[in-house]
Image (spheres, rainbow, N blue to C red):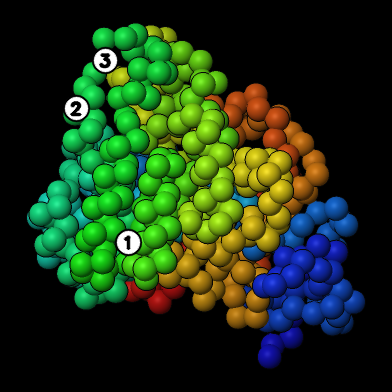
Amino acid sequence: MPAPNLVIRGQQVVLPGSISPASIHISGNIVTSTGSFDDVPADCELIDVNDESIVMPGLVDSHVHINEPGRTEWEGFATATRAAAAGGVTTLIDMPLNSIPPTTTVAGFKEKLAAAGGQCFVDVGFWGGVVPGNTSELAPLFSAGVVGFKCFLIHSGVDEFPNVTEEHLREAMPELTRLGAVLIVHAEVPGPINITGIRNDSPAAYATFLASRPRAAENEAVDLIIKLGQEFGTRVHIVHHSSADALPVLGEAKAAGIKITAETCPHYLTFAAEEIPDGATEFKCCPPIREAENRELLWSAVADGTIDMIVSDHSPCPPDMKLRESGDFLAAWGGISSLQLRLPVVWTEARRRGSSIEDLVRWLCTAPASLVGLAHRKGSIAAGFDADLVIWNPERQFKVEANTLQHRHKLTPYNGRVLQGVVEKAFLRGRKIYDGEEFIAKPQGVLLTHASGE
């Protein structure tokens, strides 16, 4: 075992199975061992963490829209990964849209990799996409290094990434099963939305938008994916789940042994439809933020494991696309910017409900790492894992101010909100990348692809 060149120690270190005083021994990029607080070899750098702060695995965010190339004015690798580092996220996975070209072909993936090179402050992996007619591209994309594949069951919002139907999935899912690749699904079907139609009520009223995306659209989509997952044996995952009505069938599917997992997002666990002001289009996302009683049922599902993880679904756009002047919820772009804030937002709400730091690690680190095939090296502090760490103070509060956010555009529904939990430092593979609002050195993130061996 190589001698450590760095030891980080603290009174509250989150290790598998415990939070305790410990020292983390790091050699190069890797955690070589963890020991008692006083286990510090001679001749290595020592970082002592203050007693109030937590040392936790670096966060893994498996749902981030970076949009470069093609829509870099919406978000880019440099700005998104700076925001990630400032939020304690050391690994993120980029969605296959809204970039141009999308990551639905090997050629498109190569353009994505070329755009990301040399810009990333954290490690970045990539989802591929399932769209009508690209089944022959799935094996080459998986071989090239995407972590899995995303599809939409309803229009994605951009024409470059069309949605699939059950017929398309029946073609693609046997190939995904053969590859052992996970299919992640935007689970809304158009039928209930088309039946609801566009109401004649004010488009600036949040109630109008909420009624236009009924729970039934999610519920029917979840039923479909469970049915197909069981039929084809494909590993499936429901993204940004918001409808509490579908939680019982999700739980039943898991209990029946169907290979299905699910995520939700901080905004569904924080906000409530009744509290969203009319015209406040920064709150628009799809599926929508639902009522307070729905929020509490989502929290119960997170607590009991029906929902496996909490990811950001950071989906920014230029502010003018949010149509704040007219406040038109129906026409505004749907997506919430929150990449930098996931840890404090979730902790603020979780601690009120009696959840623990260990719960937080499972939702924000371990489960997302497992989803994307990185559980052997990310999401835990253990020997042989990448030395990705976040040091944060769970007792400190701060007020969200737009000018402190690192992502490209600052419009967010969290602006002005008081949150609990301040990220103090972040380490990526043993190197400090963030230290109290300062970024260290140049981008050092690695592009995580199977093809590169990473």
Nearer to us: label 1 or label 2: 2
**C-alpha distance separating marks 3 and 1:** 34 Å
SS at mark 3 in the image: loop
In the rendered view, does 143 fall on the left or right side of 86? left
Q: Residue at x 30, y 37 (%)?
A: 216
Q: Is residue 270 visible?
A: yes
Placement of 432 over or under 176, stated as above or below: above
Contact (Cβ within 8 Å) of mark 3 with mark 1 = no
Residue ID for mark 2: 195
Measure the C-alpha gap from mark 1 to mark 2. Answer: 27 Å
Give the CA distance from mark 2 to mark 3: 11 Å
Q: Quadrant of residue 340?
A: top right
Question: Residue 114 location in percent, x, y?
Answer: 33, 56
Q: In the rendered picture of this protein, how many numbered marks are placed on residues?
A: 3
The residue positioned 60% from the left and 26% from the top of the image is: 415
Image disc number at residue 199:
3
Q: Is residue 42 above or below residue 61?
A: below
Residue at x 40% of width, y 64% of height? 254
Q: Residue at label 1?
A: 236
Which of disc 1 and disc 3 is earlier in sequence? Answer: 3
